[in-house]
Amino acid sequence: MRSRILLSTVVPLLLGLVALVGVSRNAYADAESDAEADAEADAHAKMPVIHVVLSGATHFRLGKSISKISLAASAIADVSAFPPDQLLVTGKQIGQTTASVWTKDDEITIVSIVVGYATDEMLVSLKRALPRAKNLRVESAGAALLLSGEVADVTEVVRAEEIVRSYADAASSSGGAVAPRILNALTVPGDQQVQLEVSFAEVSRTALRQVGLNVWHRATNGDYATQLVPPALSSDPAGAAGPDLGLTNVPVMATPISGAFGVLFSSAAGTSFPFSAALSLLAQRGYARTLSEPTLVALSGEDAIFLAGGEFPVSVPQGLGQTSIEFKKFGVQLKFTPTIVHDTIQLRLAATVSDIDFSLGLRLASVQVPGLTTRHSETTVRLRDGQSFAIAGLLSDRVRSTVDKVPLLGELPILGVLFRSTSYRREETELLIVVTARLVRPQAERPPLPDGERSTDPSDLELFLLGTYESKQNPKAVGTPAGPVGFAR
């Protein structure tokens, strides 16, 4: 009984001692490994570091007589010893390696060699080319180059990257290496968003005056008939069936001018002088006004595109009797690229206003394809915040006069009007495109949507009798819904 009690007491004590010994050994091992890591870190911190430029060379004085050198990666650098204590290091490839140097006292010194780009020369060139830049830095980041700092505008961002890339390409080509990737972390202070307001105004006026005359005469005995018609017009022969005008044997006479007002005169068939005449008179005036004011916002250096119009299909013949469909855009088209340069805004702008015009179209495979009347402007201007610039203007005045006449007879002073057809057309066009650029920033609140005056459908009296197509109401007089509105979740 006493032995059992002794065993139950001694065994836990022994197990505890064993566990304690194991913990102490682990702690000792961890402390030993930490000490080795610290020693290695101290040794690495005390290790001499040699920086050399790619395809360049530098020398390093060790301070002790050198007997032997061993290089870890000969593809990155080349190391030569010059007595008594100097090392010549040549950079061959971007990277890092180490060299072990033995002295005559049998001591070993580990030297770290870092091959990189000529960042100091790059930084000097950057500061010279960009005097307004702040906190410029060029650093090697592995096989890439990190460019950071603050520049005045977007153009300086591009210029800085081009300068750094020129140095890197030159060094890489001479060393046979691949050109590095440039990590551009440059920042531009201030507002970098541009709002462009384009005002496109066009006024077109047309005036047309036309006079034409057709005459017909038949002999009293009915042996012959004579008719005078303008060019490109024809008439039914004498005696053809005509409209019921209460007259007999009167030809169906074509009007000299299509779409014009006409006056028809004809004598009775039993008269001694059967005679018919058709006179056309037309005076036409047209007025058209186009006003478009698109507004677009874009980031500096980025493209912005705006289209208010549509697209219409056009069938395009292909080989083997097949056709394909292409869509042509029409309406108000705007494309611009703003670039903030110092305190000005440089705009590359292309503005187009087009309308469908069937008179300019053609018939293709039994399909009528319309044409486009287009006004296009493309330019590059520079202006300050809030300034306006008239980038395009047009003043056109075209006059066309056409006289179709019978030779000699059409030149008579008074009677010549019976033997000629006259057309006079005048077209005047005034066009102006004005752009306004502004530096903008986002608003904290959503701007109100354009509503204007509330309107309703017109009544029958307003629509048919008064000719009013829209009935307007006072916004204050419009009541609110009598009940809760919105969406329920």
Image: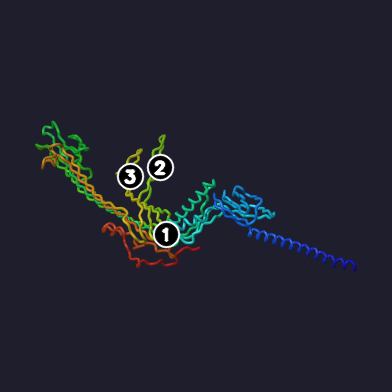
Dot 1, how many residues are within 10 Å of its Cα: few (below 14), some (14-19), or many (20+)?
A: many
Q: Is residue 254 left or right of residue 131?
A: left
Q: Earlier in the sequence, mark 3 or mark 2?
A: 2
The answer, for residue 359, to whether it is visible in the render is yes
Residue 155 position within the rendered picture, expressed as x and y whole percent measured from the top left: 43, 55
Q: Secondary structure at mark 1?
A: strand
Q: For the residues marked 3 and 2, what is the alpha-carbon distance in whole angstroms?
A: 16 Å
Residue 258 position within the rendered picture, expressed as x and y whole percent measured from the top left: 22, 43
- The structure residue drawn at horizontal position 67% and vertical position 61%, both measured from the top left corner, is 38
Q: Is residue 218 left or right of residue 35?
A: left
Amino acid beneath label 3: Gly
| Quadrant in the rendering for residue 220 | top left
Residue pointed to by mark 2: 325
Choose mark 1 or mark 2, whichever is in front.
1
- The structure residue drawn at horizontal position 74% and vertical position 62%, both measured from the top left corner, is 28
Q: Nearer the viewer, residue 68 or 28?
A: 68
Q: Secondary structure at mark 3?
A: strand
- Up the image or down, 422 lies above or below 24; here it is above
Q: How is the image coloured?
A: rainbow
Quadrant of the frame with the N terminus = bottom right
Q: For the residues marked 3 and 1, what is the alpha-carbon distance in whole angstroms?
A: 37 Å
Q: Are marks 1 and 2 in contact (CB under 8 Å)?
A: no
Amino acid beneath label 1: Gln
Q: For the residues marked 1 and 2, what is the alpha-carbon distance in whole angstroms?
A: 38 Å
Amino acid beneath label 2: Ile
Residue pointed to by mark 3: 371
Q: Are marks 3 and 2 in contact (CB under 8 Å)?
A: no
Residue 394 position within the rendered picture, expressed as x and y whole percent measured from the top left: 28, 51
Q: Is residue 328 left or right of residue 186?
A: left
Residue pointed to by mark 1: 193
Dot 3, how many residues are within 10 Å of its Cα: few (below 14), some (14-19), or many (20+)?
A: some
